[in-house]
Amino acid sequence: MSTDEFEFSFQQQLENALLEEKAFVLFRKPGEEEVNLFVNEGTGSHRFLMHSFNSEMEKVISTSIPTKILQEKFQAKFRLNLNCAPEFISKTQKEYESLIQFTVDSLQNTELQKVVISRLKVVDNPGFNWGESFAELLKAHPTALVFLWHNPGDETWLGATPELLLKQKANTVQTVSLAGTKLPDAEWTEKEYEEQKIVTDFIVANFSEVQNLEVMGPETVQAGKFQHLKTYISGEIPTGFPTDTLLKKLHPTPALCGMPKKKAFEFIQSNEGYERGFYSGYLGIESDDSKEYFVNLRSAQVFKDKIWIYVGGGITADSNPEKEWMETELKSGTILNSLR
């Protein structure tokens, strides 16, 4: 099929999905130049899945006929048929900082080493154009998985996540440890290096079945306006070894939950004050010959009247509540700055 034919097929499939109100997902992988489109058939070997933070929900869009278009040619403008948002009152700055202080105190008095605390920032939706907003995210975040998931009458999500959870092709597996956040003009501190080490050590401990393990890093990487510490981890698994086994061990990582994992998860469920749903779960792209999973960060759930932007940060015994609030405010810019 020629480039022009691919372009026509992509536009026609997208227009039909919108007209017939079919579930679809648009996405571009990190570092690539093509936007992919899966329109849901309910069957097919090409799958894009959303898996919840608490592992109790998983939703899939699957197709046997994926199509794609060069990012530079993506110019779709469209609005979506969306539900109204449920009633929700988001935490004030004072309430969030109080929760962070309570978390810091708990870290100093228990076996907890780190807990990831998140919140929902709610903004009005005056009628944004979701094709244009998606295109803005593509341009602003070339090294992220950028996605727009829409299931009419159900979930609609938009995001640009910088973090790979797991990638498998043949016997090779790869992951990254991404933890520690700062603005480019700031210096790294012991807090960020400790966060990074906690996540890296966790992954290595859970890769016990992985052979020829290689660990490289950490290095500083850019993600939008932020810099993160990133370590690359790779190796080989025995033939027939199930990827799900590694996924279950990894999710949720300390970058999403905390350490020790079980205690941190229980602390979040008891104190965060809302259900994360698919935020800080993972997104999967599966085909016959490869599987890639990304952490669902820097994302928002989209409604007819509101946008729920999910933001959070890793809390250690050295965390400053006011700085943590400001970090979440800055992180919300990933979505806010793309809205058109």
Image (cartoon, helix red, strand yellow):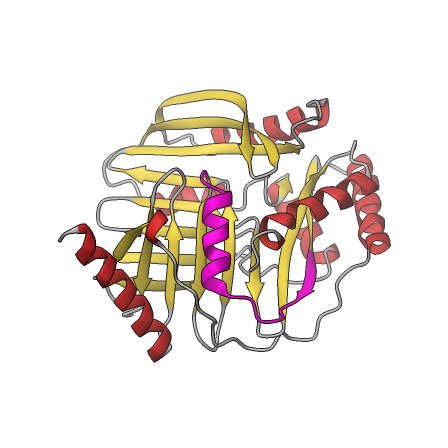
Left or right: 60, with 159 as reference point: left
The magenta segment: 120-143
Q: Is residue 98 depicted above or below 131 in this figure?
A: above
Is 4 positioned to the left or the right of 297 in the image?
A: left
Is residue 102 rendered to the left or right of residue 269?
Answer: right
Residue 64 in the image: above or below residue 254 = below
Q: Nearer the viewer, residue 11 or 189?
A: 11
**Towards the viewer: 203 or 165:** 165
Q: Nearer the viewer, residue 135 or 294?
A: 135
- Looking at the image, is 303 positioned above or below residue 313? below
In the figure, is residue 44 to the left or right of 311? left
Judge whether residue 57 can be spotted in this image. Answer: no
Most distant residue in the left direction: 1
The residue sitting at 49% across, 66% down in the picture is 156
**136 or 242, nearer to the observer:** 136
Quadrant of the rendered structure where residue 149 is? Answer: bottom left
Q: Residue at x 61, y 35 (%)?
A: 226
In the depicted structure, whether residue 287 falls above or below residue 167:
below
Does residue 265 belong to the magenta stretch?
Answer: no
Image quadrant containing the C terminus: bottom right
Q: Where is residue 196, by image quadrant? A: top right
Q: Position of residue 205 (x, y in %)?
A: 50, 30
One can see residue 5 in this view: yes
Residue 271 locus on image (x, y percent): 75, 55
Q: Position of residue 78 (x, y in %)?
A: 44, 69
Q: Residue at x 55, y 48 (%)?
A: 297
Residue at (56, 51) in percent of width and height: 280
Q: Position of residue 288 (x, y in %)?
A: 22, 50
